[in-house]
Image (spheres, rainbow, N blue to C red):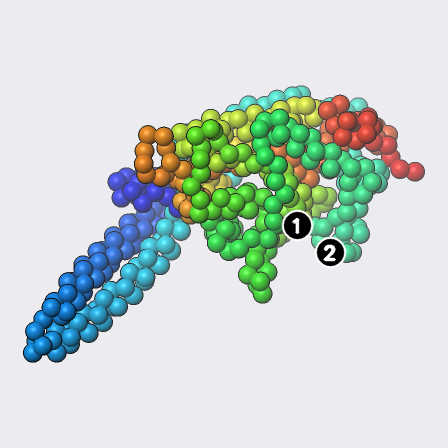
Amino acid sequence: MIDPVLLRDNPELVKRSQEARGESPDTVDVAIEADRARRAAITAFEELRAAQNAHGKRVAQAPKDEKAALVAEAKELSERVKQAQHAVSAAEEASTEAFALLENIVIEGVPAGGEDDFVTLRTHGEIPAFGFEPRDHLELGEKLGAIDMERGTKVSGSRFYFLTGVGARLEIALMNLALDRALQAGFTPMIPPTLVRPEVMQGTGFLGKHAAEVYHLEDQDLYLVGTSEVPLAGYHMGEILDLSRGAKRYAGWSTCYRSEAGSYGKDTRGIIRVHQFNKLEMFVYTTPEEAEAEHRRLVELQEGMLQDLGLAYRVIDVAAGDLGSSAARKYDVEAWVPTQGAYRELTSTSNCTTYQARRLDIRYRPDDASKTQPVATLNGTLATTRWIVALLETHQREDGSVAVPEVLRPFLGGLDVLEPIA
């Protein structure tokens, strides 16, 4: 949630942010009124509670002949207090619902608009050119004995697959390379749970307008995560963190699940858009003042990976209307996919400022203050299954073999070329 004080003091800023996202500014007025009603209900309850306490003392000290009347008044006052308490609960529920419609305040400079309104910040590497007709990643994967979509569909349905042989080894190598880089950068490795409680999923902002993309186990009331950002954000839920020695950085390795609701007909071939994949996700807790610098640091780590893997890519500043509700700014790193003649997202990294931390009650105590404040949270992908798409297509050879980038070879037992199977 956004800072209620900011909403009261600068509603126009919140309205501009909502409008940049393509949301109605009327949601701001509704939230302001709900916040006012909540505070008024609390004040009324506290005043009645104080009157009830004072009246109780009068009853205790009153002469015997006055007690009957005072006790009757006490019962009436008790009923009014009970009603006021119910009014507070209702007002708080209405306020929570109204605030849930307010997405994080976008950072100044984030482009307004929707999916196509991003700004390209930079490109890197030469777009690969071939002296032959390049194969797409699925055809290459089948020749290499690396990807089996047919049996994935037979076993689990559409958008499922098997990674087999060198395909399985390649994914594990990618993840291990990413984990190695994360360790060098001071991240603590984590293997988090992939089922989380509703309050964690809600707190990270994944049960808003994209809730249909999340798998829900109704009987257990648990959610399958689409990224380890979710359990890593919940890891310190309800805690006060010590950030005096710097940010807390975690690297979560997990299987991820997405229903891909609304993607009918999109990327149906291969493993670009699937229901299950593996991912190494960076997650950072830091102070709000350090958040933007930390954001740039995450992008540098991502770019370093792609550069060493020999992939051509671009970095884009995602437009406000294409941000998730929790992100105040998001950078995507998109690699060139030769057979599509386009850049496709391989990584994204988001600065969620204090939005998730307010929802999950994660705070820290600044050195110069006795009062705690919400931390800032950030997340960014360092490797995922989709990277195989760009790797196979970029480094393919005419005979269907694929050169292994040097940086990956130690994680593949020294293998330098992936050869088609007989």
Q: Position of residue 133 (x, y in %)?
A: 79, 30
Image point (78%, 37%), residue name:
169
Marks 1 and 2 in Cβ contact (< 8 Å): yes
Q: Looking at the picture, how far across and down is residue 4, in whole percent? A: 31, 45
Q: Residue at x 40, y 33 (%)?
A: 288
Residue 275 disc label:
1
| Front one among 398 and 367 | 367
**Badge 1 or badge 2: first in the primary sequence:** 2
Residue at 80 percent of width and 23 percent of height:
131
| Residue 107 quadrant | top left
The picture places residue 65, in percent across and down from the top left corner, at 7, 78
- Quarter location, residue 135: top right
Going by the numbered disc 1, the residue's amino acid type is His
Q: What whole-number distance in Å separates the C-alpha atoms at marks 1 and 2? A: 10 Å
Count of number-bearing discs: 2
**Which amino acid is tagged 2?**
Ser
SS category of the residue bearing label 2:
helix
